[in-house]
Image (cartoon, rainbow, N blue to C red):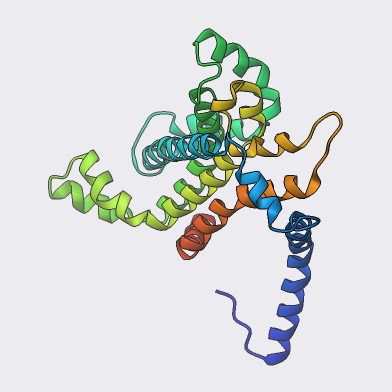
Amino acid sequence: MLETRTRSSRVILQIVVTIIVLPFLFPLVAMVQGSLAGAGWSNYAAVLSVPQVPYFFRNSLIIAAVTIAIVYACTMTAAFAFSKLRLAGKEIYFWMLLAALTLPEVVLLAPLFATTVALNLFNTLWSVILPLAALQIPFTVLITRNFLNGVPDELFEAARVDGASTFRAFWSIVLPLTRPIGAAIVILTLVGSWNSYLLPLVFLQSPEQQTITLLPQFFIGQFANDQPKVLASAVITAIPVVVAYLLLQRMFERGLAAGALK
């Protein structure tokens, strides 16, 4: 950890951090202020009175929860295999997986649309869950593998000497030790799945299947553009992610730091 031992260095560091944070803070302040323009808190009441809001929250929660479960399970097993198991050609497979990081979401829309239609998944939550999980896994495997590379191999060798199977070593050693990076995976996946806009917009056509990110569209039309209610919708959408981050903040930061340094 970096330390600042003098008062002047701490002051300089504080100024630099403040300057870095301000560009990200101003849009958030403007969003909250704009959501209270005009009718004030009545804007939030109007947003919450939209009949589809409960369905939107339910669908977003289902998508986020299932995506997190898929990403976590695939990430932990894949990272364990890439880091600690002796597999032929595992480095080739690892770099092929990382190549997926170069593919932006919008480029994949056409093949994903054809695939979901062929599999009869169009207008179902699975048409959003599976692509979201696939897009998250390469990055989460990368940081988790780096984390596991810092775990001593002697732990696994001792487990084998004691007669533990590969699954037992994974369950008793990998999962307990990867809780910090697991929290980081949960937060990153939650943010990505909860804030996803393009995939639900394309693949979910029925109002009862859509997600909370599509809520602002109820206040934007050909002859209307109620910006205070649009901003109130954005604030309501962001609250669950902010709360989840605050609850897992310490483990999230520990996990990212360990995954980057080990």
- Above or below residue 123? Residue 70 is below
The quadrant of the image that shows the N terminus is bottom right
**Where is residue 20 shown, x and y percent of the image?**
76, 66
**Farthest right residue in view:** 223
Residue 74, compared with residue 147, is above or below; it is: above
Judge left or right: residue 119 versus residue 19: left
Q: How many marks?
A: 0
Q: Is residue 27 left or right of residue 118?
A: right
- Provide residue 55's location: percent of width, then percent of height: 52, 34
Nearest to the observer: residue 10 or residue 49: 49
- Residue at 70% across, 27% down: 106
Q: Is residue 256 visible to us here?
A: no
Q: Residue 115 vs residue 107: left or right?
A: left
Residue 155 horizontal side relative to residue 137, left or right? left
**Residue, far left:** 163
**Looking at this rendering, what residue extends furthest in the top direction?**
118
Quarter of the view holding residue 62: top left
Give me the residue at 69% from left, 91% from top: 7
Residue 147 visible somewhere in the drawing: yes
The residue under the point 58% across, 34% down is: 52
Where's residue 99, x and y in %?
Answer: 60, 31
Q: Is residue 118 above or below residue 51?
A: above
In this view, the residue in front, 88 or 113, is 113
Between residues 153 and 63, which one lies in front from this camera angle?
63
Location of residue 258 in the rendering, given as x and y in whole percent from the top left corner: 48, 59
Image height of 9 relative to 252, above or below: below
Q: Residue 9 sits in which quadrant?
A: bottom right
